[in-house]
Amino acid sequence: MISENILNEFNNKKILITGGTGLIGREIASILHDAGSKVTVVSLDKIVINKNINHIYGDLTDFNFCKDITLGMDYVFHVAGIKGSIDVTVKNPASFFVPLLMFNTNVLEASRINNVKKLVYTSSIGAYSAAEIFKEGENEEKEPMDMFPGWAKRMAELQIKAYAKQYGLNSYSIVRPCNVYGPGDNFDPKNAMVIPTLMQRIFNKENPVTVWGDGSAIRDFAYSSDVAKGTILALHHGTNGKYVNLGSGKGYSIKELVETLAQFLDFNYEFDTSKPSGFPRRIMDINLAREMIKYQPETSLLQGLKNTWEWFKDNADEYKDKQNYFASE
């Protein structure tokens, strides 16, 4: 997806990746390290993803810290966020909203003050209003479907637009990924999303594995490496201060997801129809990303799930070393 010519742009560049130990950030770090970049990742996770990459442990809610880490950087990938299940989002909205607002405001403003040449911000599908197919520029007048984290993401997008208007700063790009999964995902059983939750239950030999809802809900699942490459392409090509979608461009029902896991894992399962199935359909239109930044997802759902499972088997407890914003709730 990324040509050698594009990767050459990053050779010897000083790169900061916030949230660099997460499932998107670690993939960006790996790709750019291999391309010859001087990569620094910053995180509150007590995880080292690569001994040859500079790791900084620090809190992005501290503005002075953000000014320190962005100083002298050529490019910034602002990927830091808070990931959790829909249930946790509803029960603990402030635990999402407040840190996200502070992360975003601080990193963006520190990057502007320190004259970072290019920045890409990772927003979210949750910033969209409810719809079946998500297309850039549509349904913007309504509130986000993921209320509190969605508003925090939209505020960061608006901050970037304000920079363009006041300072003529057009080198900041925005991407909106969908349901991202892959190595490094959040496997905390208390607040994990659907794919890591299912893998946890299979790994723990639950029999049968219980799946919430009737399996009819359709989702767009994007593999982390594909999204990481799309994020790099967004920084390279630019998005003109707008956002572009990063998804697989395909919809899979939860039933199809479970059946795909069953192609290479041996487990029994049942659907608990007393539990909600969620929104009937959520799929991203990725045509703009294909055109504007030459984004082209490469990983099938089957291969992505296999890769994730292989990583998870060896790293089942990694989530215990990750920052948990809900631990005291």
Image: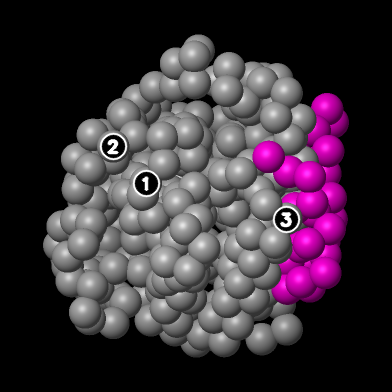
- Res 276 quadrant in image: bottom left
Q: Where residue 313 appears, x then y in whole percent?
A: 62, 36
Q: Earlier in the sequence, mark 1 or mark 2?
A: 1
- Res 287 quadrant in image: top left
Is 227 drawn above or below residue 324 in the view shown? Answer: above
Q: Which residue is mark 2?
A: 292
Q: CA distance from mark 1 to mark 3?
A: 21 Å
Label 2: element kind: helix
Farthest front residue in view: 167
Q: Nearer the viewer, residue 141 or 246?
A: 141
User: In the rendered view, does 33 fall on the left or right side of 90?
Assistant: right
Label 3: element kind: loop
Q: Residue at x 76, y 30 (%)?
A: 38
Q: Where residue 90 appears, x then y in whole percent?
A: 44, 84
Q: Earlier in the sequence, mark 1 or mark 3?
A: 3
Q: Per the image, is 69 magenta?
A: yes
Farthest top residue in view: 4
Q: What label does residue 75 carry, if any?
A: none
- Mark 2: give few (<14), some (14-19) or many (20+) Cα within 10 Å: some
Q: Which residue is mark 1?
A: 239
The magenta stretch is 45-74
Q: CA distance from mark 1 to mark 2?
A: 7 Å
Magenta stretch, main secondary structure, is: loop
Q: Residue at x 73, y 43 (%)?
A: 73
- Mark 1: give few (<14), some (14-19) or many (20+) Cα within 10 Å: many
- Mark 3: give few (<14), some (14-19) or many (20+) Cα within 10 Å: some
Amino acid bearing label 2: Met
Q: Which residue is mark 3?
A: 114
Q: Where residue 263 appears, x then y in whole percent?
A: 33, 30
Amino acid bearing label 1: Thr
